[in-house]
Image: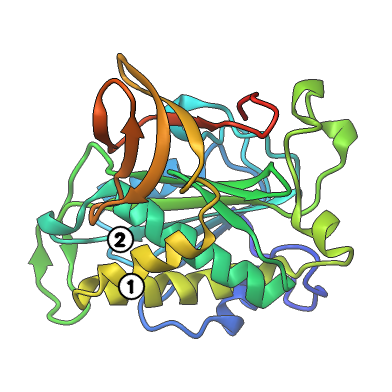
């Protein structure tokens, strides 16, 4: 782990700069635990899960310049050249009723959209359940996980030891990609912020904005206003209203994606099964030429 020079101009991640830019109350401000910036790490989600097992409280940020074993959903590898993206995970301590992974993925997607608009002036799309997309290409992804080793933590408010589950929310956003560093099969399938913006994007500001928008989105959910978060996701969806193919475990279906439900599940109208709600799985969207992507 390393802290970078705060005099850097923002083109590289700097923990001091991120913390100076933070305007949050909880995220990035965990009592008694320092945020972490890694030059290289296997996975920011795995590190946040390890901190949870050590009893870290809510709000710890783990950021990396490079992930060597980053992953997306279904165990897929996330390609992470040095300084090519922003990789950040946050540890949450929800109560037992607040561990809905699809809904937290939806919330993080909304936060990413808002942060990218604020920092880069770019409108991006959201593909159910966890993809950030632009120009039909993947710009980033979100991974919500509940670590397998629950541990207590010390409450900052009371100083008392509390038992709690942990939930880790991770986001990876492509910042700048050299196509020559990518596997050939990915070169026409991924996009990056700086390529879209045509100018540099400050990764420190992006992390700070993402933390603020995520905290605001989580606050809405805690206040019983998850419907507002779902509506925001719908506004940026590239999935709803489109014909799709879906695979969820042994279930495979085709149909029209019509909506998401209150838990973040995808509602699909199918010919043979009627209306079906997916709470997990993988989808592809049918293009105008009949192919799927």
Q: In front of the other: label 2 or label 1?
A: 1
Please state the horizontal and vertical placement of residue 22, each as a whole percent of the image.
53, 81
- Residue under numbered circle 1: 228
132 or 169: nearer the eye? Answer: 132
Q: Which mark is residue 92?
A: 2
Q: Which mark is residue 124?
A: none
Position above or below: 94 against 266: below
121 or 29: nearer the eye? Answer: 121
Please state the horizontal and vertical placement of residue 78, each as a whole percent of the image.
60, 34
- Which residue does the image show at 76% across and 22% down from the upper left? 185
For the view shown, which residue lies furthest in the top direction?
250
Please state the horizontal and vertical placement of residue 106, each as a whole percent of the image.
39, 55
- Which residue does the image show at 31% across and 19% down from the upper left? 249
Q: Earlier in the sequence, mark 2 or mark 1?
A: 2
Mark 2 burial class by Cα count in 10 Å: few <14, some 14-19, many 20+: many
Quarter of the image with the C terminus is: top right
């Amino acid at each position: 782990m390393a802290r970078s020079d705060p005099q850097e101009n923002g083109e590289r991640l700097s923990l001091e700069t991120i913390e100076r830019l933070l305007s949050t109350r909880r995220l990035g401000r965990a009592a008694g635990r320092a945020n972490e910036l890694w030059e290289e790490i296997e996975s920011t989600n795995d590190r946040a899960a390890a901190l949870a097992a050590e009893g870290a409280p809510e709000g710890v940020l783990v950021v990396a310049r490079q992930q060597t074993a980053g992953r997306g959903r279904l165990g897929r590898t996330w390609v992470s050249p040095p300084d090519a993206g922003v990789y950040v995970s946050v540890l949450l301590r929800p109560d037992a009723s607040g561990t809905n992974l699809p809904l937290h993925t939806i919330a993080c997607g909304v936060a990413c959209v808002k942060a990218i608009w604020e920092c880069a002036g770019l409108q991006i799309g959201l593909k159910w359940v966890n993809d950030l997309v632009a120009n039909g290409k993947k710009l980033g992804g979100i991974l919500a996980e509940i670590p397998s080793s629950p541990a207590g933590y010390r409450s900052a408010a009371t100083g008392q030891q509390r038992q709690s589950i942990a939930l880790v929310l991770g986001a990876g956003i492509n910042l700048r990609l050299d196509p020559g560093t990518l596997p050939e099969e990915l070169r026409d399938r991924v996009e990056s912020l700086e390529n879209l913006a045509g100018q540099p994007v400050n990764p420190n500001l992006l992390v700070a904005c993402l933390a603020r928008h995520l905290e605001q989105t989580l606050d809405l959910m805690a206040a019983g206003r998850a419907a507002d978060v779902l509506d925001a996701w719908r506004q940026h969806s590239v999935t709803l209203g489109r014909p799709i193919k879906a695979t969820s475990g042994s279930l495979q279906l085709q149909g029209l994606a019509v909506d998401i439900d209150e838990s973040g599940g995808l509602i699909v109208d199918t010919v043979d099964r009627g209306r079906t709600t997916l709470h997990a799985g993988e989808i592809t969207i049918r293009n105008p030429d009949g192919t799927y992507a």
